[in-house]
Amino acid sequence: MGEPVKKSAIPLIVLGLAAAQPAWAERNPADPYERYNRVMFKVNDTADKYVISPVARGYRAVTPKPVRMGVTNFFDNLRDVVSMGSNLLRLDIKRASEDFVRVGINSTFGLGGLINIADAGGVPNNKNTLGDTFASWGWKNSNYFVYPLMGPSTVRDSVGGTITYLYPVKNAIFKTDSVRIGATALSAVNTREQYLDLTDSLGDAAIDKYAYTRDIFMKMRARQTGASLPQGADEEIDIDDLVTDENGAPPAQEYAPVTEPAVPETRLPESSLDVPEAQNEVLTLWEPDSVQ
């Protein structure tokens, strides 16, 4: 299903978006499955409203922030293992080596990944996915697809995400089915908790949230993979406004570009769009491999 996806990605993360508006936006040629996608968008939203979001709020209420950060770091460390494998498949030895260093440092000095030593040491954070690998092999353009319970994706990224879901890294660590199920649930709830404030602020946005999410997500992935930019009703948004932070650095849970020369990694800064402030980071949150 990557970064995202930018987050990482990847996702459960956008389940907090409000239900799609009744009025359909102008048809986007990159979204031939729009009828299905809108239905699944609604299903994801309903699941989040009545199950996932309430559990995430309870998790936030009873779990100290340092503990939640440790959980986040642990599962990010597993994502670095996936990124290393993806980069090896792409024959990108440089980024695979960086991923290897990250996993080694965080797994040893970081107490099994609970502490993110690699970021503090300035080790690059790539977070590549199988979707990025497929794009580097030539499958750059891919239609939009809403993955059940995981959110915005493409057909290409969904194939990659499904493979990593069926053969997750955590299975090498957790030996029993009950522990594996618990780890998957914890990862999902912890990830959802991180974006409660963001998704809570989207409810009053006077837009077609389905179309908005789709168009920004597709433009973000096109920038990351070198694909052709899809055309749609959201063309007035300048994707250059969504690139990196004020220091030019990529976000912690972004995807590296899949072609050389390197394309700047994308994120949505805090004030890039003339919409409610929290929407500016919606699409950096998606992580197609967020549950390993």
Image (cartoon, helix red, strand yellow):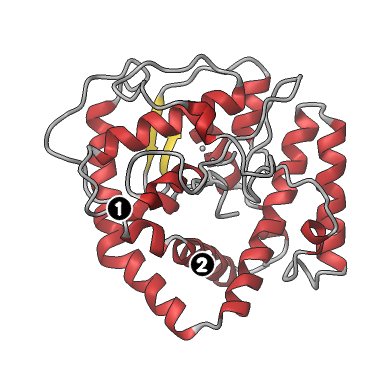
Q: CA distance from mark 2 to mark 1?
A: 20 Å
> Do labels 2 and 1 touch, CB within 8 Å?
no
Residue 53 location, x and y as percent? 34, 66
* Residue linked to disc 1: 202
Residue 128 location, x and y as percent? 67, 38
Residue 160 location, x and y as percent? 57, 35
Other-residue count near label 2 (Cα within 10 Å), few / some / many at <14 / 14–19 / ≥20: many
Relative to 202, 14 lies left or right: right
User: Label 2 is placed on what type of residue?
Assistant: Asn
**Is disc 2 placed on a helix, strand or loop?**
helix
Please state, as top left, top right, bottom left or bottom right, where the C terminus lies in the image.
bottom right
Question: Viewer-proximal residue, 8 or 78?
Answer: 8
> At 66% from the left edge and 42% from the top edge, which residue is drawn?
250
* Residue linked to disc 2: 190
> At 32% from the left edge and 58% from the top edge, which residue is drawn?
201
> At 22% from the left edge and 21% from the top edge, which residue is drawn?
26
Other-residue count near label 1 (Cα within 10 Å), few / some / many at <14 / 14–19 / ≥20: many
Relative to 188, 67 lies left or right: right
User: Hey, which quadrant is residue 291 in on the image?
Assistant: bottom right
Question: Viewer-proximal residue, 199 or 205?
Answer: 205
Query: In the image, which disc is placed on residue 142?
Result: none
Residue 252 location, x and y as percent? 66, 51
